[in-house]
Image: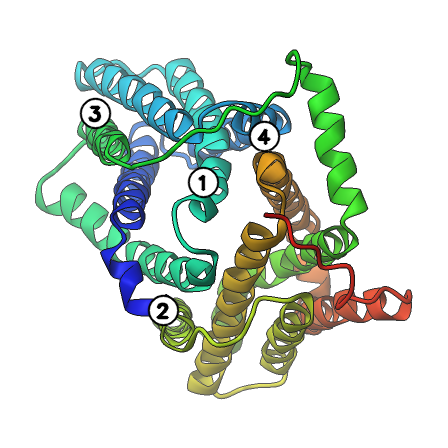
Amino acid sequence: MSKEKLYLNKNFILLTMGNITTKLGTKIYEIILAWWLVQKTGSAATFGVIMASSLISVVICNIFSGVIIDRFNKKFILILSDLISAVVCIFVGIVVMNDVLNIPLLMVAAIILGATNSLFSPSIKAILPELINKKLIVSANSITTVIGQVITVAAPLIGGFLISGLAVGLGIGFIINGISYLLSATSEMFIKYKYVRESKGNLNVFADIKEGYSYVFQQKWLFQLLIVSALFNLFISAYNINLPLYYLNIYNDDGTYYSLALGAQATFAILAGLLIAKRNKKAANPALLKQQLLFCGIPIVLLQFVSISYLSILLVGFFAFFLTTFNVYFFSLVQQEVDRDKSGRVFSFIFMVALSIMPLGTLIFGLLSTKIFDVVFILSGVGIILSTLIVKSSHINLNHNLQKSI
């Protein structure tokens, strides 16, 4: 099947449209929420508490969401999670538009949205291999990545215009987000998806959770990559939290260089996605993933020794390029190789690990940032590189035990 046919695949287009609208709506809402809360309370602490509530909700619910995804109709789960999110956002938007500053209500909304996200994100990854030819999965993920990066760039611009140009408040922000969920649900309703109910006996949540974890541990290639990915997320936190401080201290930056670095990050990520989508010749495999992680670590280490601003911006771009390549091939490999009836639990486990490790890394390296600033990028980059070498030195072969699942 040719790559061009992916663009004519109605199911992929509908799924992507739904994903685009929810991501864009959520990003705009978060920008408006942060600005509105700072204006009303004079502090960013409240925004942090609300976002933490959502994160905790996602992590906890991911423990159970995979069971639901594997047991029930994935298309129905996508639609239902979007509709619940839409109702919550529109209701809270109406309340807030009446100038009612109710922080507990915002926290409850964040918790519910976190719960629905714990269903939506793994479901959209798990359903993709059932909608398109497996040979097109890498291209599909690269296109999705490009769109995601475009949204990352566009959302702050749109959010800023809504705040400053149209004086949009939080109530409208919630309603915009609610409408985006409604549009997503509508798009997903037209997806042609044949749900095959597999006989699994009576629902036993904890037994199903145990089965899912056992499956991850038994698939050595998957378990090994998850360990490496967890370590990567830990060390990348040091990079993320110290990058603004780096430009401030080294270049006496007023925000210009840091903004350019973020722009380079998005641009190189988009470039990586486009190149993968165009070529699509390399098969996703653990050896390729390991290679990309090694390449991720090198630019970060070099960043510590660079004193030329534009060279540092280029290194940030190269890091984003290899990180994007890793992410595209990682999710593609999981989608291609994991058993269909386990995919929901596997993706829930992946998201749970990522969302748990990164805040931990942010806390650790945030507290240590001033003490280790002179070597922080060396620690981060070398940590990423060693996370792959440790696997090799432990006699774990990343190229074996790949199993065909479908």
Tell me the residue at 19%/31% (across/down). Answer: 169
Earlier residue among tags 2 and 1: 1
Q: Which of marks 3 and 4 is in front?
A: 4
- Residue type indicated by callout 1: Ile
Earlier residue among tags 1 and 3: 1
Tell me the residue at 61%/56% (across/down). Answer: 237
Against 86, residue 254 (above or below) is below
Label 2 element class? helix
User: Picture coordinates of residue 375 (x, y %)?
Assistant: 71, 72
Q: Residue 349 carries which label?
A: none
Q: Residue 270 carries which label?
A: 2
- Residue type indicated by callout 2: Ile
Instruction: Say few, some or many: other residues with alpha carbon within 10 Å of mark 2 (under 14 / 14 to 19 / 20 or more).
Output: many
Alpha carbon separation for disc pair 2 and 1: 24 Å
Figure colour scheme? rainbow
Q: Could you tell whether 156 is left or right of 373 in the image? A: left
Q: Name the residue under label 4.
A: 66
- Residue type indicated by callout 4: Gly
Q: Mark 1 points at which residue?
A: 127
Q: Quadrant of residue 232?
A: bottom right
